[in-house]
Amino acid sequence: MNERMTQDQRLDYLVEEFKADSDEYKDLQTPNDENGKRRVLRSLMNIRMPRKMDESVLRVQDDYLKERIYENGIVELSDVPVIRDGLSIWQGDITRLAVDAIVNAANSQMLGCFYPCHTCIDNCIHTFAGVQLRAECNRQMNLLRERCGRDYEQPTAVPMLTPGYNLPAKKVVHIVGPIVQYRLMPELEKDLADCYRNTLDMCMENGLASVAFCCISTGVFHFPNKRAAEIAVQTVTDWMKEHPGYMERVIFNVFKDEDKKYYEELV
């Protein structure tokens, strides 16, 4: 049945299934327009707690998301120019990149963004990966809580590796960046450098030869954009010199023009 469904039929089906899956929103009135339906589906996915879902629904979700990503345009590694020494800058939506790993700026709960249709990278990655990603993050966090106590939260700069599920990227590295609350301190700069270094170590240990970093800790975490770019480029450059031959490509993925300008001055 799923193979014969159109994308519109998949969307209608998924909206109704995710509504039925939610006690609070099962009677929600569905909009008639496509964009309205997309917003409802994304919202229901975003707020859904990690739990089992029927495999038949997941198959339709997977087909729907893969088609959405195809429509958005998949960016292959060969489409991203090398600037120098295996380093690249690419401006755009990180969920389009077909690389070995993309980096997600996570929070200490490691379950993704629960705010419906939020534009943060955490929300975007979880939305287009599918609900399996939150379930896997939850599984890993539960194992860590068994070892470390039920109040365990993921520390800053400690990466977690998951499959990419429906994303073009094979894997997702989730990492909690430092939060600048008052002013930038040396220990926060070290924490940010550790985010890049520890992620690259994880990639090396898992045979992942290409990775796209988002601008970790900028935005709502208030790390100054220019200084964050300086730390990112310096740390990655140093790591590549210390570990020649392990990484084919490191991409600095930027979304804002401001960040693009800083990275272009540095790489």
Image (spheres, helix red, strand yellow):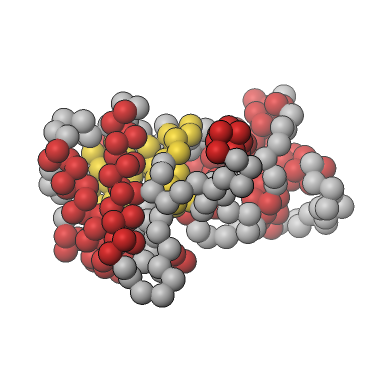
Taking 181 as reference, is 239 above or below it?
A: above
Q: Residue at x 48, y 34 (%)?
A: 162
Horizontal relation, residue 88 to residue 123: left or right: left
Q: Is residue 188 above or below residue 123?
A: below
Q: Residue furthest right?
A: 27
Kindly indicate the quadrant of the structure image that contains residue 92: bottom left
Q: Is residue 193 above or below residue 141?
A: below
Give the residue at x 81% y 53%.
25
From the viewer's perspective, is residue 245 above or below residue 212? above
Which residue appears farthest toward the bottom when viewing the image? 182
- In this orientation, which residue lies closer to the viewer: 217 or 266? 217
Q: Nearer the viewer, residue 49 or 74?
A: 49
Q: Residue 1, percent across and down?
A: 72, 24
In the visual, does 142 lie left or right of 155? right
What is the x, y in percent for residue 53? 72, 32
256 or 160, nearer to the observer? 160
Residue at image point 47% right, 66% down: 220
Q: Position of residue 130 (x, y in %)?
A: 59, 39
Q: Quadrant of residue 2?
A: top right
State the count of labels. 0
Q: Position of residue 216 (x, y in %)?
A: 37, 56
Is residue 41 among the parts visible in the rendering? no
Q: Which image quadrant: the C terminus?
A: bottom left
> What residue appears at the point 87 percent right and 52 percent down from the top-left corner?
27
Asked whether residue 220 appears in the rendered view, the answer is yes
